[in-house]
């Protein structure tokens, strides 16, 4: 069945982000503008310790952000290890639109952001610094993921014209190794879409998601005729099959097809996603394996 457009879906329960995107879409914004603006809400949310400013630092105290964005025409941009700007998604969009490249990393991403007029910011907030100092007492390197409902934001928007765009933004695993990059900015892993088919975005243990190129897999399964739900289940089960330790981490994927049908699946109980449609936000618990 064809759903009413526009539709926004996003990982976890980020109602302000989905509302912002949904309201822009209702006013006629493109999916690309809506997805960027929606994700920016969470990047600026200081209480979210896994996205943007206020994100947890790595184990050496650096806050480093990863993000990507994909436009309906398949164009894509990404930044990894971005250190001095809250809105990684906007820098990723500039990479997409104003360079011949897809991804910029570290110092190069930083230099590019300055050149494009993004002012240098300090992403470590007093409370994330305090939490880091607490962590330093034990320095336990044990990335526990998705235990609480504050996490990576991945968003997919279908606009009034039926066009699809997506974005994903994160500070990655808390107290990760310096230099570690997860799935979120990797086209095909953390996010993928094909405007003829649909889109998918992932959250959870980036290493497992990257090794299985999970978002690309979901879109290709939908291309072959699977529903978004079937596609998400197959992709998460692939991760489970390849990881004997799957009980120790979370991986979750949400997907939408061109009709606006939605699916989601994850390993462990506790993951939800938010949908904004017809002026209403709904938080929906995902089906899960365990
Ligand atoms: C990462 N996938 O960096 C991200 C983290 C995440 O829920 O999604 N956490 O591995």
Image: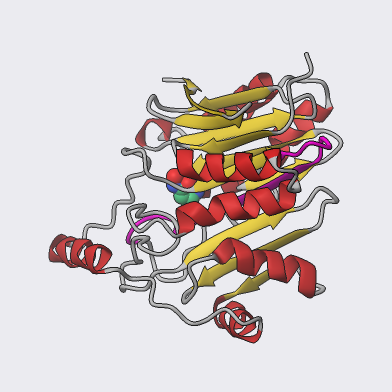
Identify the residue at horizontal 81%, vertical 41% (top origin).
194
Residue 69's place in the image compared with 160, above or below, is below
Which residue reaches farthest top? 1
Q: Quadrant of the N terminus?
A: top right
Q: Nearer the viewer, residue 71 or 143?
A: 71
Q: Nearer the viewer, residue 38 or 176?
A: 38
Can residue 4 be seen here? The reply is yes
Can residue 242 be seen here? The reply is no
Q: Is residue 57 left or right of residue 120?
A: left
x, y (%) of residue 287?
Answer: 50, 19
Q: Quadrant of the C terminus?
A: top left
Which residue reaches farthest left? 137
- Total labels: the figure holds 0
In magenta stretch: residue 20:
no
Identify the residue at horizontal 55%, vertical 83% (top origin).
107
x, y (%) of residue 51?
Answer: 44, 56
Residue 83's place in the image compared with 155, above or below, is below
Q: Is residue 108 left or right of residue 164?
A: left
Residue 128's place in the image compared with 219, above or below, is below
- Magenta part of the chain: 158-175
Q: Nearer the viewer, residue 123 or 144?
A: 123
Residue 56's place in the image compared with 161, above or below, is below
x, y (%) of residue 187?
Answer: 69, 53
User: How is colour applied across the structure in the image?
Assistant: secondary structure
In magenta stretch: residue 173:
yes
Which residue reaches farthest front? 27
Identify the residue at horizontal 27%, vertical 63% (top origin).
128
x, y (%) of residue 171?
Answer: 44, 59
């Amino acid at each position: 069945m064809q759903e009413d457009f526009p539709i926004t879906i996003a990982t976890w329960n980020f109602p302000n982000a989905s509302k912002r995107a949904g309201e822009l879409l209702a006013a006629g914004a493109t999916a690309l503008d809506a997805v960027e603006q929606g994700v920016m809400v969470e990047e600026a949310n200081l209480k979210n310790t896994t996205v943007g400013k206020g994100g947890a630092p790595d184990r050496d105290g650096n806050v480093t952000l990863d993000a990507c964005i994909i436009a309906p025409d398949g164009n894509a941009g990404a930044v990894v290890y971005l250190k001095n700007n809250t809105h990684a998604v906007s820098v990723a969009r500039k990479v997409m639109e104003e360079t011949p490249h897809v991804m910029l990393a570290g110092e190069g991403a930083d230099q590019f952001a300055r050149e494009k007029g993004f002012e240098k910011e300090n992403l470590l907030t007093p409370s994330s610094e305090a939490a880091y100092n607490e962590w330093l007492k034990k320095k336990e390197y044990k990335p526990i993921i998705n235990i609480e409902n504050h996490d990576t934001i991945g968003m997919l928007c279908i606009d009034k014209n039926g066009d699809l765009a997506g974005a994903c933004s994160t500070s990655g695993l808390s107290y990760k190794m310096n230099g570690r990059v997860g799935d979120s900015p990797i086209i095909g892993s953390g996010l993928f879409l094909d405007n003829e088919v649909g889109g998918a975005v992932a959250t959870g243990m980036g290493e497992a998601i990257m090794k299985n190129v999970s978002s690309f897999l979901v879109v290709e399964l939908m291309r072959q005729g699977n529903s978004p739900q079937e596609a998400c289940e197959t992709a998460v089960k692939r991760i489970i099959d390849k990881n004997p330790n799957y009980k120790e981490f979370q991986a979750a994927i949400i997907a939408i097809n061109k009709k606006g049908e939605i699916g989601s699946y994850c390993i462990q109980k506790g993951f939800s996603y938010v949908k904004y449609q017809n002026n209403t936000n709904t938080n929906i618990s995902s089906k899960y394996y365990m």
